[in-house]
Amino acid sequence: MRSVIFLVAFVSVWILATAAVYAEALMNAVSFQPVPAGSAIFVRPMDNSDRNLIMQKDFERALQSKGYIISKDADLILTFETLDAAGTWAGGGPNRIVELSNNHDQSGTDAPRVHLNLFNSARGGLLNPNRKDATRTVTPSSFRIDVTLDNKTDGKRHWQGWSSVDTNVGSSRQMTNVMIPIIVDGVGQTINEKSFPLLP
C-alpha cells in the first residue's frame, strides 16, 4: 500500500514538473534593415517603473553578452514596453445554494427571508450542485514585451520584436529572465511564431 501511495505521489510531482518545464512562450520579429554586429545601442524603457528599470539592466547585460556596446550616445535606440493583459471568463456565476435577503418591510418585526435553492438547471442547487454552465477561461491572462530598434539619425526602424506568454506559469521576474535573452538573440532577424520553453 505504501508503495502505491509513493508511486502516485511520484507520478503527480513528475507531471507537475514536466508541465512547468514545457510551459512555452512565443517570439515574433520583423527585420527592416541590418543590425551590424558590435553596434552601439542605447536601451530605453517606455516608462520608468521599478520592473522596467530592472529589465533595462537585463537588456543591457544580454546585449553586451552578444557583443553589442551599450552607450547613451548611440545612434541605435532599443525601446521596450511591457504589457499585462487580463484574461476574460464566462460562466453561470456562483452556485448559490442558500440565499439571504431582508424583507421590504423595514419595521424590524419580520425576520430576514431565507431561500434554499434545491434545484437550478443553470447554476445548480442542493440536489444538483454541479452547474452545467461552469465558469471557464475564454482568454488567458498574458504578459508581453514589445521591442523596437530605431536609428535616431534618420528615424528609420531597423528591427521590431515581441514575445508573449500566459501569466499562470510563473512570476514576471522569472519570465523576463528567460524572455529577454531570447529577444536579444533575435535582434536583426525575422522570426515567425517561434516557441521556447519557459521555466517557472
Image: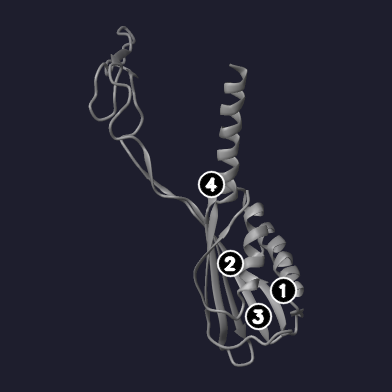
Q: Can residue 181 be seen in this view?
A: yes
The location of residue 54, given as percent across then percent down, is 72, 61
Q: Is mark 3 on a helix, strand or loop?
A: strand
Q: What is the spatial separation of the Cα atoms under label 1 and label 3, in whole angstroms? A: 12 Å
Q: Distance between the residues labelled 2 and 1?
A: 17 Å
Instruction: Identify the residue at horizontal 63%, vertical 51% (top origin).
Output: 199
Which one is nearer the viewer's eye here, 2 or 100? 2
Which SS class for mark 4?
A: helix
Residue 103: x and y in percent read 29, 16
Residue annotated with mark 4:
168
Q: Tell me the amino acid under the disc marked 4.
A: Asn
Instruction: Tell me which amino acid carries mark 1.
Output: Leu
Mark 4: few/some/many CA within 10 Å (<14, 14-19, 20+) = few
Amino acid on which the number 3 mark rests in the picture: Ile
Disc 2 versus disc 4: nearer the observer? 4
Q: Name the residue under label 1.
A: 63
Per the image, the residue denoted by label 3 is: 77
Give how far apart the Cα atoms at labels 4 and 3 are.
32 Å
Query: Which of the labelled discs sits on residue 81, or is there none?
Result: 2
Pointer 2 or 4: first along the chain: 2
Query: Which SS class for mark 1?
Result: helix
Distance (Cα) linking label 2 and label 4: 20 Å
Classed neighbour count for the residue bearing mark 1: other residues with Cα under 10 Å, few (<14), some (14–19), many (≥20): many
Q: Image point 60% across, 88% down: which residue?
A: 34
Upstream in sequence: badge 4 or badge 3: 3
Where is residue 178 drawn, in percent x and y? 65, 59
Could you say where residue 95 lies in the image, as x and y percent from the top left? 34, 26
